[in-house]
Image (spheres, rainbow, N blue to C red):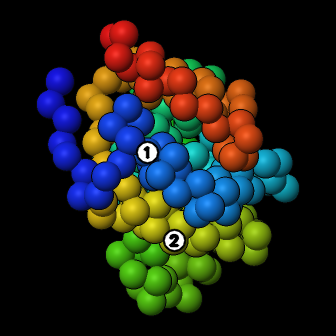
Amino acid sequence: MKINMPYIDLPQEYPGIRSLFVYRPETAAPLCNLAQVLLHDPHPTLSAGERELIASYVSNLNTCKFCTASHSAIAKHQLGSNLALVKQVLADPDAAPISNKLRALLKIAAKVQAGGKNVLPEDIAAARNEGATDIEIHDTVLIAAAFCMYNRYVDGLATWQPDNEAFYDKMGEQRVREGYRPSSINFTLAEELKKS
């Protein structure tokens, strides 16, 4: 397996954002807590699977392999092991079998990914017409903006990102079970990667 060299001295046994969390635990804590609130904690109306789809979709638009693979795996597990649905959303949300509301929210997320000022009043109106609430619109924009940050953090320091679907799948199961709180992020999956 080819491992790219990160731009700074990161612990090589940990892939992607995990290496950055180990390197700088002081910044890991607020980043993990933000992910916990946005993606894992109970939400008034958006399921954890829908929120993970938004994160995965934005990560895919940003071509961040680690975040796309890991959040796709989490979404899969949050959506009843439906990897086909996740792949359809990544490929073409307009053709994917999702609600019109989620489709409208993904359009907003894509606009945020391209630049926040690309979101127009008509995008918000379209989402509202499909039943989106203010908190759903707010959280979609924040998830999209946060994942632009996470993606650029992971790729901007050239973290190594494995090509191992089983690794991401195990990580997805773990995140569904344990969430994103700093105390629940354990890094033993890197050892699993070495075994595969």
**On-image quarter of the C terminus:** top left
* Disc 1/disc 2 C-alpha distance (Å): 22 Å
Q: Is residue 104 visible?
A: no
Binning the other alpha carbons within 10 Å of mark 1 as few (below 14), some (14 to 19) or many (20 upward) gives many
Question: Quick one: label 1 or label 2, which is nearer the N terminus?
Answer: 1
Q: Is residue 83 left or right of residue 92?
A: right
Q: Residue at x 47, y 52 (%)?
A: 23
- Residue placed farthest to the front in the image? 9
In the structure shown, which secondary structural element does the residue marked by tag 2 occupy? helix
Question: Residue 94 at x, y = what percent?
Answer: 41, 53
* Position of 85 relative to 116 (above/below): above
Q: Is residue 193 left or right of residue 186?
A: left
Which disc, if any, is residue 19? Answer: 1
In the structure shown, which secondary structural element does the residue marked by tag 1 occupy? helix
- Residue placed farthest to the left in the image? 2
Q: Which residue is mark 2?
A: 145
User: Which amino acid, mark 1?
Assistant: Ser
Q: Residue at x 25, y 51 (%)?
A: 6
Q: Closer to us: mark 1 or mark 2?
A: 1
User: Which amino acid, mark 2?
Assistant: Ala
Question: Residue 7 at x, y = what percent?
Answer: 24, 58
Q: Is residue 169 left or right of residue 43?
A: left
Q: Residue at x 36, y 10 (%)?
A: 195
Tell which of 166 and 144 is nearer to you. 166
Question: Residue 151 at x, y = what percent?
Answer: 39, 59
